[in-house]
Amino acid sequence: MTAGLPPGPDALRRSLTDEQWRVTQEKGTERPFTGRYVHNDERGVYACVCCGQELFASDTKYDSGSGWPSFWLPLAGDRVATRTDVSQGMVRKEVTCSRCGAHLGHVFDDGPRPSGLRYCVNSASLDFRPGDAPGKQAP
Ligand SMILES: [Zn+2]
């Protein structure tokens, strides 16, 4: 065993379910209204299921009616990265975890005020941690 190295692809594969692997590593999309966090309104933080980086807080989650967990803003800092995605005949903005590159979902500009953004994220990409939102936690 080599200590101190991040988990390799094999370890990551073993730690994820088939659905989590398909969505985060193969840029899949879970079927609407099937994700475990669609209707989760508990207080807490949503972290990347692959690397554990905290991405979204329950404060910014809202019901967009789309069938996927929706957020109007990620947590502060560059925790999510976006890039243009032209697959499937559409021009969309893909959202990924800035640390490990896991596919999270897409961001659209039809969200509520004040941001006007809708981060449409697969439940399979997220790991929910109940509790206080970050900012109230010690750094
Ligand atoms: Zn990640």
Image (cartoon, rainbow, N blue to C red):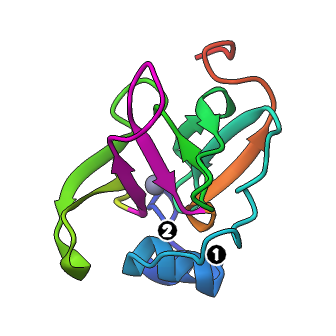
Query: Is residue 6 shown to the viewer in this render?
Result: yes
Q: Examine the rendered structure and indicate whether residue 36 appears above or below residue 1.
A: above
Tell me where residue 14 appears, x and y as whole percent. 62, 83
The Cα–Cα distance between marks 2 and 1, rounded to whole angstroms, is: 10 Å
What kind of element bears circle 2?
loop
The magenta-colored residue range is 102-122
Q: Are marks 2 and 1 in contact (CB under 8 Å)?
A: yes
Q: Residue at x 67, y 37 (%)?
A: 45
Task: Give amino acid for label 1.
Answer: Ser
Residue 42 is left or right of residue 66, and the answer is right
* Residue 101 falls within the magenta-colored stretch: no
Between disc 2 and disc 1, the foreground one is 1
Residue 7 is tagged as: 2
Query: In the displayed structure, does residue 103 sit left or right of residue 12?
Result: left
Query: Which image quadrant is residue 60 in?
Result: top right
The front one of 56 and 48 is 56
Instruction: Look at the picture and state if 70 lies above or below 30.
Output: above
For the C terminus, the image quarter is top right
Could you tell me which residue is drawn at 26 percent across and 49 percent down?
A: 82
Q: What type is the residue that disc 2 sits on?
A: Pro
Q: Nearer the viewer, residue 136 or 42?
A: 42
Residue 35 sits in quarter: bottom right
Per the image, the residue denoted by label 1 is: 15
